[in-house]
Each structure stands twice: as C-alpha cells, then as structure tokens.
C-alpha cells in the first residue's frame, strides 16, 4: 500500500478493530516539516495503533526519525534525533476535545477522518526544537568533508536579496 499514510482513515472503525499500521514516510513529503529540513532526506518510521479508551478512539503512536535541521549558530546541517511515543485521542470537534483526559494529546478530526501523515507530522513538530543548535561535543562551526558550503549558505542568499529591496 504505497502512500497509505496520506489516505484518510476512519478512526472510529479502526479503533473498534484495534488496527495497527506501520508507516515509513519521507520527511520531505510532510508539508509542515519540509520547510525546516536542512537536507532533503530522512524518513519517519513507526507504528500507529488504534484502540478504544473510555469510549474514545485513541491512537498509540511510536515514531523515530533523524531530522536534518540547520544549526542557528553555525548555519550548517545538524541531525536532530526524534524517538517519541504519544497517546492521542481523535475527536470530532473542539467541544469533544474538552472532555479528553489530560494525559492524552488531542487531535481534532472532522468526521473522525485522520491520516497517519497528519498524526506523525503533529508529533514531529512537537519534538523539534524552537531553535536548533549543535549539541556540546558536536562540531559546531566546523566543516566536515560531506557538508558542502553552498547547502548551508542558501537561507541567507534569499534574505540578502530581500534586504536590498528595502527603502
Ligand atoms: Zn552549529
């Protein structure tokens, strides 16, 4: 089932059947993750398990990914590892979301329709840092052989053009 992660699924039905879905999603195909990637690569892998919890459709999500971000200190690519687990209640509207137990995350899915991609993207966004920086012990500011300069300078090329256009 290629691209199964982008198909709308009926959360209620899958919860009743206790369905597990394994996924493998190229990060560049997630619209809110793609703009943050320093390199056009990486895959989010894991499992989404639908079940019923206190009457609600709930998913247990396990996701792992190596996300390539731009270090905001040296502007070179860095890898941000994500290995997360979450329990997410799938509800139909904001009113239903208010009744969800506090230990659960909530996703509002009109008509109970969700895609695996949306759930994974949401979880990745929560796991990414506000400001990406090389960790202590990593080679911040140093160029290694496989990191060509042009890749990391791109973000500023656009900014410089923008500034020139100012008054
Ligand atoms: Zn750095």
Image (spheres, rainbow, N blue to C red):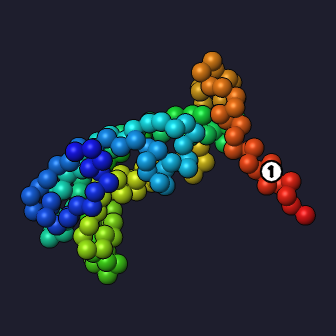
Taking the view exactly as shown, the residue that stands out farthest to the bottom is 95
Please name the residue that numbered disc 1 is placed on. Answer: 161
Q: Nearer the viewer, residue 87 or 77?
A: 77
Position of 129 with respect to 95 (left or right) is: right
* Residue 121 position within the rendered picture, expressed as x and y whole percent measured from the top left: 40, 53
Taking the view exactly as shown, the residue that stands out farthest to the left is 17
Position of 61 with respect to 131 (left or right) is: left
* Residue 165 makes an appearance in the image: yes
* Residue 51 position within the rendered picture, expressed as x and y whole percent measured from the top left: 15, 58
Task: Examine the rendered structure and indicate whether residue 95 appears above or below residue 148.
Answer: below
Q: Secondary structure at mark 1?
A: helix
Position of 27 with respect to 8 (left or right) is: right
* Residue 165 position within the rendered picture, expressed as x and y whole percent measured from the top left: 85, 58
Q: Residue at x 69, y 32 (%)?
A: 150
Q: Residue at x 40, y 41 (%)?
A: 26
Q: Nearer the viewer, residue 29 or 36?
A: 29
């Amino acid at each position: 089932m290629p691209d199964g992660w982008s198909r709308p699924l009926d959360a209620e039905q899958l919860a009743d059947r206790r369905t597990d879905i394994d996924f493998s999603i190229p990060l560049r195909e997630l619209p809110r993750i793609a703009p943050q990637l320093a390199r056009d690569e990486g895959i989010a892998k894991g499992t989404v398990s639908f079940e019923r919890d206190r009457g609600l459709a709930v998913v247990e999500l396990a996701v792992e990914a190596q996300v390539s971000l731009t270090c905001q200190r040296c502007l070179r690519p860095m890898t941000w590892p994500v290995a997360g687990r979450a329990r997410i209640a799938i509800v139909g509207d904001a009113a239903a979301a208010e009744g969800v137990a506090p230990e659960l995350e909530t996703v509002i899915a009109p008509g109970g329709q969700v895609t695996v991609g949306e759930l994974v993207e949401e979880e990745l966004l929560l796991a990414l840092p506000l400001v990406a920086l090389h960790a202590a012990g990593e080679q911040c500011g140093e160029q290694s052989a496989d990191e060509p300069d042009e890749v990391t300078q791109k973000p500023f090329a656009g900014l410089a053009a923008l500034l020139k256009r100012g008054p």
